[in-house]
Amino acid sequence: MPTEATDRPDERRAAERPGSKRMTMAEAIERFVADGDTVLIEGFTHLISFAAGHEILRQGRRDLTLCRLTPDLLYDQMIAAGCARKLVFSWAGNPGAGPLYAFRRAVESGEPHRLEIEEYTHFGMVARLAAGAAKLPFLPLRTFSGSDLPAVNRRIASVRCPYTGEELPTVPALEPDVAIIHAQRADEQGNTQIWGLLGVQREAAFAAEKVVVVVEEIVSEEVVRSDPNRTVVPGLVVSAVVHEPWGCHPSFAQGYYDRDNEFYVAWREISRHPERLASYLDEWVYGVDGRAQYVDKMGEGLQRLAAAEAWSRPVNYGF
Amino acid sequence: MPTEATDRPDERRAAERPGSKRMTMAEAIERFVADGDTVLIEGFTHLISFAAGHEILRQGRRDLTLCRLTPDLLYDQMIAAGCARKLVFSWAGNPGAGPLYAFRRAVESGEPHRLEIEEYTHFGMVARLAAGAAKLPFLPLRTFSGSDLPAVNRRIASVRCPYTGEELPTVPALEPDVAIIHAQRADEQGNTQIWGLLGVQREAAFAAEKVVVVVEEIVSEEVVRSDPNRTVVPGLVVSAVVHEPWGCHPSFAQGYYDRDNEFYVAWREISRHPERLASYLDEWVYGVDGRAQYVDKMGEGLQRLAAAEAWSRPVNYGF
Amino acid sequence: MARGTDTDTDTGGFTPREMMAAAAARELVDGQVVFVGIGLPNLACNLARRLQAPDLLLIYESGAVGAVPERLPVSIGDPALVTNSLGVASMTEIFYYYLQGGRIDVGFLQGAQIDRFGNLNTTVIGDYAEPRVRLPGSGGACEIALHAGEILLLAEQSPKVFSERLDFRTSPGHLDRGDARRRAGFPGGGPRRLITDLASYDFIDGEMTLVGLHPGSTIERVRESLGWEVRLATDLATTPPPTEEELHLLREVLDPGRLYL
Amino acid sequence: MARGTDTDTDTGGFTPREMMAAAAARELVDGQVVFVGIGLPNLACNLARRLQAPDLLLIYESGAVGAVPERLPVSIGDPALVTNSLGVASMTEIFYYYLQGGRIDVGFLQGAQIDRFGNLNTTVIGDYAEPRVRLPGSGGACEIALHAGEILLLAEQSPKVFSERLDFRTSPGHLDRGDARRRAGFPGGGPRRLITDLASYDFIDGEMTLVGLHPGSTIERVRESLGWEVRLATDLATTPPPTEEELHLLREVLDPGRLYL
């Protein structure tokens, strides 16, 4: 080997790679989420890491730029807790159950403090993450025409097609400081497998500077290798792997547990009243030391959500 | 229903959809490949439909624009047979085994006739198909810089990023008249499942006007529905489904049969000599009436390529 | 759209929302590819699948393709949409390849404000920077409005919803006239039909035109709940009421818990 | 590069291609992500995995990620690359997310013509429009050359390969001087080392500089097989010959059929 080897950037980078990336949620948030960061906890209805969001609140992070297509209950909680400086999003409602009142209070009357917003459509957010994953500064896409959105978001621009002369809308790449991705399973290196709705989990992971993967199960490399097409996020982009069963509740993990729709419906009234929301956070976020305690505290309530069985047929990878 | 319903374009389109799209290879090529068409038979080393290419030759199609990242043995045969007016490609070699001599003769000395070429890199071809699939007129990508390729291919252009001011190379969308995609299995509606190397099969199918899917197995819809994440090409973009076991030979189908590397090596000497190539075509293409007869004629030679078993672990889709 | 409220009036043995679901279902043609929303659009599509359109292909924004939900989905990403579906697409594929790719025949949209050209507001009531009411925003609505072959609109009539001017245009309908979309180069056809709790409208020359009154409804009630003088078709019809079969399927099979009816 | 030919000379119990494979393997550092080609690069990577770099992550252009081929792959898309791999990426992901995404530490390249700055020609000999010899073209080489953290070049020395001027520049090396890539804004570092059947070269100020002679090779032989006066490092070394262990692994485990050695 050449004698100058240890000065090479690739070698330094390699030396940072640990044998296992497994750590607790508290360690992962401590190491990889800092005050002022741009944070993306993704998952389109499916695989939303409530466990990670709650730990961010427990650790008292501040001035975050929160990004998600659908802020959902999780970001409503985080906005209410005051950790967000800015929200980047495309649809801010309680899916199937009404408004997100904490989000509305922040935007309509600056409570608990003023929240800056940067708003796109779903397609716009998807394209921003695809551009970020590809390390392109922008991507063209056909939306926004005939909408007032470009008038209120100057980040929406356009480009002239060099072939047709047509003017196409563009969005800038979104490259979060950290993406937090829930998944069904991963090995200790972070090779992550997802089935069911994929959302933008892959793009989020490739777009971000650091990636925390949270899983229902840590599996051996052999399980991953038995079905390589199931791998959505490769370990090489992953910074931390956290084992957190039931880590999505009240969101869901296909094949593990159903969405807790009763809670989504109940959130309507909780979030409508700031004091009820505060006592929810006191009890279920600040009042527990982590997801395991949350699960214990939920008790029987969770078991009714456990998934029934509907197994895939295996396929042959032999040659 | 409104009385004007039958005049609505959507209704006419729906009426064309048959219950089953299954047909023979001869029917599929007869209906969906015409003289002068831009034809894409994709598959990156894996899942190359030699069966479809051979049927195109048997039916005597002419003046085709053949597109593929890697022309491979199949397009070498088709070029030798004289059906190609133009080749759009990014790497024209016999993978692991030397040159494609028929391609070389066409380009170096115009035999059997002059072949127009339009040349990209792999990334360029991939981006062209991704643009075609997305119905965008172009996509930006970072390649070609420092290469002489843009000087010989005026279709490679550039665009200025509206955010950074940076000039980025672009390629135009590729939207073939017909894409022919081999896969492991599909149902009769064309819902197509692939595992192992994916190449650009998905992008090819979405980019093309018409799509012929050729499979090792026709399966019931129930098999497809047992593992929806395995579906790479949805039936809604598929025009025809052809059942053609061993349809890739000498290419391969993961889990079904191995690549016939001996034939790839042997092709070097066959293609080097025009008369040997001609007699190969006479015997193995024009001398059989279809892939079933080719398989019979191959006899025992194929069985040594049958795949061993290496089954995936099933996953649970329940809720 | 809000769930059915106490003001739903029973009209000859069915509710206005049952009428809307049945009328919307009848607009769907077998074999079409439909981009489905949760609530009434989902009920309409699954009703049509059980009647005239068994091969209707249901695609949900969340990525489920060819879904056959065995329970009433309560969110656009309900796990029941995935189990036994024909395929799952990532959202990059859904927006770039399916919607922008022109693969969707019909899209359903709703709006907090709708104007006479079918333009929609789901963003804010009041000023964008200092809104009186902040609504959820576009989600995928703007791109559905641009790319689907045609749009079916669903809404409950009130002057607050049907207003002459939108506070914010989230998703384009026919802009300001019949050929505006074509001139602007929009790929999809835009709103074709609007079904409300009172009536059905077609967009003729791009403008909402009353074509059918639901049983029990009157032109006067329609006029009271629109923010402008509505255009009338020359041959005004009465919507056929929901059939026994439609009502049976809606009530007993599709939404027995009366979540959306 | 062509397979080992009859002109390979046995030099102290090993062939020049065995020396190349061993020398290339020693350049790889544990934990690196390597974009692997078929033939010698594949042998070098799999040799390194069995020695100093067990966690070398092998990615093949065809989409196999974390491949552990149980037989010698005979094409870039050999099915053995997929079985028991860690993941399969579509080619869109491979090029947009892995390569352009800056995830590749090391790429291997070869060339029919190579100039002193490590620029490569794999397109044509002669004129592009009327070539004397039409070569395969870029494939993924141009983007590997631009994006990989560093490039390792492999070639057999001859004046035909190492020419002062390329007939066509397919993939950029250091263009025409040491800082040209940085000035052009190329994301990857470009060629770092070239290993031939005779010697090893580093690219110093962007120019091929002889740093080590393989056992049995001489400066004279090196000079005869280059199309220009080669630059010499001040401290010229002799490449350590392949060890017993390297030879055992190459001959008995990795390529027992001597397909590439």
Image: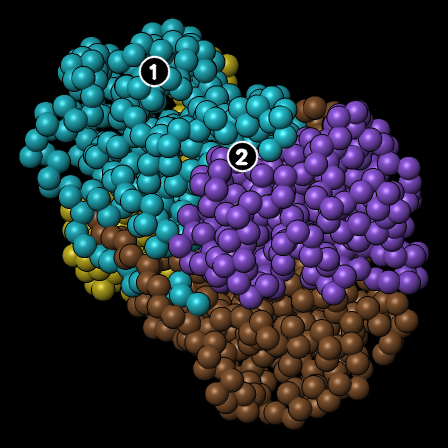
Chain colours: A brown, B cyan, C purple, D yellow
**What type is the residue that disc 2 sits on?**
Val
Give the quadrant of residue B150: top right
From the top left corner, tell me how far across and down residue C245 is, in percent.
50, 47
Q: Secondary structure at mark 1?
A: helix
Q: Could you say whether the residue bearing mark 2 is in a helix, strand or loop?
A: loop
Judge the density around disc 2: few (<14), some (14-19), many (≥20) Cα neighbours within 10 Å: many
Can you name the residue that lies furthest to the front here?
C12
Quadrant that contains the N terminus of chain D = top left
Give the chain letter at badge 2. Answer: C
Residue D128 sits above or below residue A276 on the image: above
Residue at label 1? B30
User: In the image, is residue B142 above or below residue B40?
Assistant: below
For the view shown, which residue lies furthest in the left direction? B300
Residue type, numbered disc 1: Glu
Alpha carbon separation for disc pair 2 and 1: 30 Å
Q: Position of residue D25 (x, y in %)?
A: 35, 57
- Residue D138 placed where, x, y %? 47, 33
Which residue is depicted at the point 64% across and 87% down? Answer: A284
Q: Nearer the viewer, residue B143 or C109?
A: C109
**B255 and C241: which is toward the camera:** C241
In this rendering, does residue D82 appear at all? Answer: yes
Residue C235 percent coordinates (x, y): 75, 26
Q: Which mark is residue C29?
A: 2
| Residue A172 against residue B242 in the figure, above or below | below
Report whether mark 2 lies on the same chain as mark 1: no
Chain letter behind tag 1: B
Query: In the figure, is residue C62 to the left or right of D58?
Result: right
Which of the 4 image quarters holds residue B162? Answer: top right
Among the 4 quarters of the image, the one containing residue A227 = bottom left
Q: Nearer the viewer, residue B218 or D125?
A: B218
Q: Residues within 10 Å of mark 1 (few under 14, many from 20)?
A: some
